Amino acid sequence: MPHAQLTLISHPLCPFVQRAAIVLLEKNVPFERIDVDLAAKPDWFLALSPTGKVPLLKVELPDRAHAILFESTAICEYLNETQGSTSLYSNDAISRAQQRAGVEFGGAALADAWQFLNAKDLVVAESKKTAFRDKLQRLEDKLD
Ligand SMILES: N[C@@H](CCC(=O)N[C@@H](CS)C(=O)NCC(=O)O)C(=O)O
């Protein structure tokens, strides 16, 4: 497969961006990172992002037009499939399903945390805080 040039369009505090960055770093893949001010989204970013959210991954391949990927899970799956020969998922189908469920659960927890931190009113803040705490408790229980 030809070598892709990768650009991660990011925000320094976004946990969903961190997911993609972790996969890139784990796989030792060089990439460029561009941080966007989400409080004043630039026009070029709004033109690229179907949801107005980060992360985006720009994939430039020599033999085709560049692609813009969005949604951290899809970006991580793409990176896992295309970068290096070792998958970050288990070879065992049951474990793999459990890992994917963990990714889904983690996404919901990260969304609660982000919405809590960015809540504009107390009611939302309290409800997101409770939801985030509940999910952390489920993780604690699992660790026990
Ligand atoms: N489901 C998305 C969530 C991404 C997300 O919520 N990103 C936040 C920052 S952490 C964002 O860009 N928010 C900007 C906005 O909602 O306007 C993913 O997994 O990529």
Image (cartoon, rainbow, N blue to C red):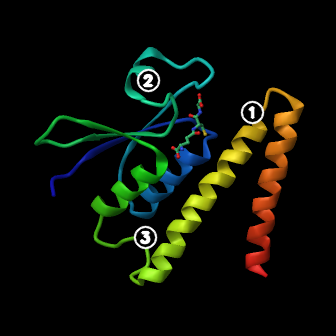
- Badge 1 is on which residue? 118
The residue at 19%/43% (across/down) is: 61
- Split into quadrants, the picture shows ligand 1 in the one at top right
Q: Quadrant of residue 58?
A: top left
| Quarter that holds the C terminus | bottom right
Q: Is residue 32 left or right of residue 41?
A: left
Q: Residue furthest left?
A: 63
What amino acid does circle 3 point to?
Leu
Q: Is residue 102 left or right of residue 46?
A: right
| Quarter that holds the N terminus | bottom left
- Badge 2 is on which residue? 45
The residue at 39%/21% (across/down) is: 47
Q: Earlier in the sequence, mark 3 or mark 2?
A: 2
What amino acid does circle 2 point to?
Phe
Q: Is residue 35 left or right of residue 110?
A: left
Answer above or below: position of 120 versus 67. Answer: above
**Residue 20, how many percent across, how many down?**
47, 51
The residue at 42%/81% (across/down) is: 93
**Residue 18, how many percent across, how many down?**
55, 50
Q: Quadrant of residue 44?
A: top left
Callout 3: helix, strand or loop?
A: loop
Give neighbour class at mark 2: few <14, some 14-19, many 20+ (Cα, 10 Å): some
- Badge 3 is on which residue? 88
Disc 3 from disc 1: Cα separation: 31 Å
